[in-house]
Image (cartoon, rainbow, N blue to C red):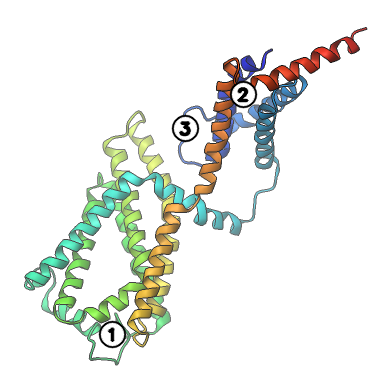
Amino acid sequence: MRQDAFVARHASEWRGFERWLDTRGATRRLDGVPRDEEVPTRYRRLCQQLALARRRGYSPQVTEQLQALMQRGHDVLYRAPPPAWRRALRFLAADFPRLVRAQRGCLWLAAVLFVVPGVALFFAVQQWPELAHSVFDPQQLASFEAMYDPADGSHRLGRESGSDMAMFGYYIYNNVSIGFRTFASGLLAGVGTAFVLVFNGVVLGVVAGHLQAIGHGDPFWRFVAGHSAPELSAIVIAGAAGLRLGLALLAPGRLRRVDALAEAGRVGARLCLGILAMLVFAAFVEAFWSSTGSIPAPVKFGVGALLWALVLGWLVLGGRGHDALARHGSAVLSGDRRSSAHPGGPEMPMARRGRQQRDKQAPARAP
């Protein structure tokens, strides 16, 4: 069989196997990707095709690509799984950021629902201070003012009492409960998640606006600068997961509604693992760093800016090297198929050279 016919016959199968390697463990099986139970058979067939390609003297690009696929398949099928701590580290470093980016539509909507009301209320309270009293009662506002009073150095920033360790536990409980409510309320057709996001944005905007208006802004911003990056980002991601639940209920697409909801729930569960890690880290920073009033404001703001850069860089860039490698491998297969199908392409001379070698060797093997 000629190389171009061989590649044309099997290229889709190779791409499917490669996509399985790239997306194994994903919550949704993509079109053209074999099921897990089919993979051992596909792997054995790939080994046979590699042996045929070598025996027939096909171009090095074809044989090398098949060799790379075979080696990756061997590593997945026959090597012992990595330890749990390494899998967790890989999930946080690469898999979680990729999963977040895959929800970009819901992510942007969640960000708008959270940020726009908060920013709008912050400036509105600056213009009309009485708006704060329509959201909080006088006792609540007095409590906020006491926690961020720049003239009172008798307690930690952002709290009236409690040790750092006790507040660490409280912040974990508070942050995780908000994140869980944001995600789980998506079962109310997404309306619950939208309400939680808007409500939290309004509360944050009104508190910040009121404290800024009465001259307590400096302690408040020094307090929130450190832990705002992981905490607020986690809430927005939880909102995206909740909105996806609602979307699965309202627009399941080709899937049955129950199947679409189950798939969105699996994606949301994986997102919640990363969200939990972000919220625990935010609680640690909030308890042991943000509440320390003796640290100068430039240091607080500098660390806060650094954490924002790190969190956004992690979510935007995490796992992209793996994505680029996968796209490169698919492009090589596609390019090899195109070049093999057209006479005069870059692969044809190598294929002809392989056939010429076989022609020279044929008389020597003949009886």
**Residue 134: x, y in percent?**
8, 69
Identify which amino acid the numbered label 3 is placed on. Answer: Leu
**Which image quadrant for residue 274?**
bottom left
Q: Where is mark 1, residue-wise?
A: 160
Mark 3 Cα within 10 Å, few/some/many (few <14, many 20+)? Answer: few
Identify which amino acid the numbered label 2 is placed on. Answer: Pro
Residue at coordinates 71% horizontally, 26% vertically from top-left?
Answer: 50
Given this view, does label 3 or label 1 mark the residue nearer the observer?
Answer: 3
Q: State left or right for residue 245 relative to residue 338.
A: left
The residue lying toward the viewer, choosing from 108 and 132, is 108
Identify which amino acid the numbered label 1 is placed on. Answer: Glu
**Residue 74: x, y in percent?**
69, 38
Q: Is residue 169 visible?
A: no
Q: Where is mark 2, residue-wise?
A: 346
> Considering only vertical position in the picture, is 169 above or below 240?
below
For this orientation, the residue located farthest to the top is 367
